[in-house]
Image: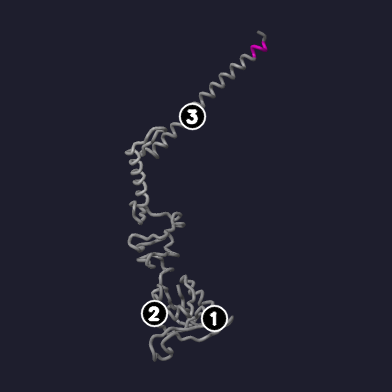
Amino acid sequence: MNQTEQSLREELEALRVRLAELERRRSHRNAGLVVALVLVAGTAWGQLVVFSPDTPAKASEVNQNFDQLKTWLEQKVGTAGTSVVTFTTPLAGAQLENLTVTGGKLADNAITSTKIADNSVTAADVADGTLGDADMGPDFACPATGVRATRGQCIFYRPSSGPAYIYNVRAAATACLADRARLCTRAELSAAQIAGLENCAFGWLADRVDSATGFVGYPMQTAGVPGCGSPGVNEISASFAATYGAWCCK
């Protein structure tokens, strides 16, 4: 055997040793993967009966699996067979962002204690249209000087104290925005008057006569009050530059 042939034989033997080592490592890696899969399956499905291929399943085992799935479902959303969904832990903000309940309601038909992270509820539709004892924060609550008119709307006058006639129309709108409100329309002030509102002080309204003139008014219930007009909504038109109070709605 010449030197070249001997060298080739040695290289071939080295390759065989290398291949055997690679096969051994691959076998160990695959075994580890199988163990991991078994552990995951055991954790996730340890309480379920696993069926074998081509082997009839026993009714008792199938029923056991259904009972376990029912238990897990009820742990998540409440008793099966009812329309009430129960959250056993507080919902996080991200979960609330896209939470939609269609055709459903809370067990007592009301929100009895609601507080979002920023103390505000921007839109709530409950079965009876009300929020019971909801903490909506001072910006969303109706001011102490305000009244509730039709459909729970809050109507109030600004400024709440001091000289009454300090706003031109733009300043009046800004004063309402400070309470997350807007200028009331003539129709809204009329509805509030029908509901019992009375305040002998002119305030800006959202309606306009033309590009430079709008409406100011006030609601009265009592006749014969000096300087307070007659029962109903007393209105006049005024230049947007003139100063009055503001009727705010939200």
Q: Tag 3 or tag 1, which sits nearer the N-term?
A: 3
Q: Tag 2 or tag 3, which sits nearer the N-term?
A: 3
- Left/right of residue 139 with respect to residue 17 in the rendered view: left
Give coordinates of residue 205: x percent, y percent.
Answer: 50, 79
Is 6 magenta? The answer is yes
Q: Is residue 108 above or below residue 178?
A: above
Spatial CA distance of label 2 from label 1 is 24 Å
**CB of mark 2 within 8 Å of CB of mark 1?**
no
Q: Main secondary structure of the magenta part?
A: helix
The image's mark for residue 30 is 3
Spatial CA distance of label 3 from label 2 is 79 Å
Give coordinates of residue 146: x percent, y percent.
Answer: 40, 76
Q: Is residue 146 visible?
A: no
Q: Is residue 164 visible?
A: yes
Q: Nearer the viewer, residue 47 or 236?
A: 47
Q: Nearer the viewer, residue 18 or 65?
A: 65
Q: Three-letter amino acid code at disc 2? A: Ala
Residue at x 46% of width, y 30% of height: 32
The residue pinned by badge 1 equals 208
Q: Tag 1 or tag 2, which sits nearer the N-term?
A: 2
The secondary structure type at the circle numbered 2 is: loop
Give coordinates of residue 231: x percent, y percent.
Answer: 41, 87
Task: Check the picture and name the quadrant holding the N terminus.
Answer: top right
Give coordinates of residue 100: x percent, y percent.
Answer: 44, 58
The residue pinned by badge 2 equals 195
Q: Which residues are magenta?
A: 3-7
Residue at x 44% of width, y 81% of height: 190
- Image quadrant of residue 87? bottom left
The image's mark for residue 175 is none
Q: Nearer the viewer, residue 159 or 69?
A: 69
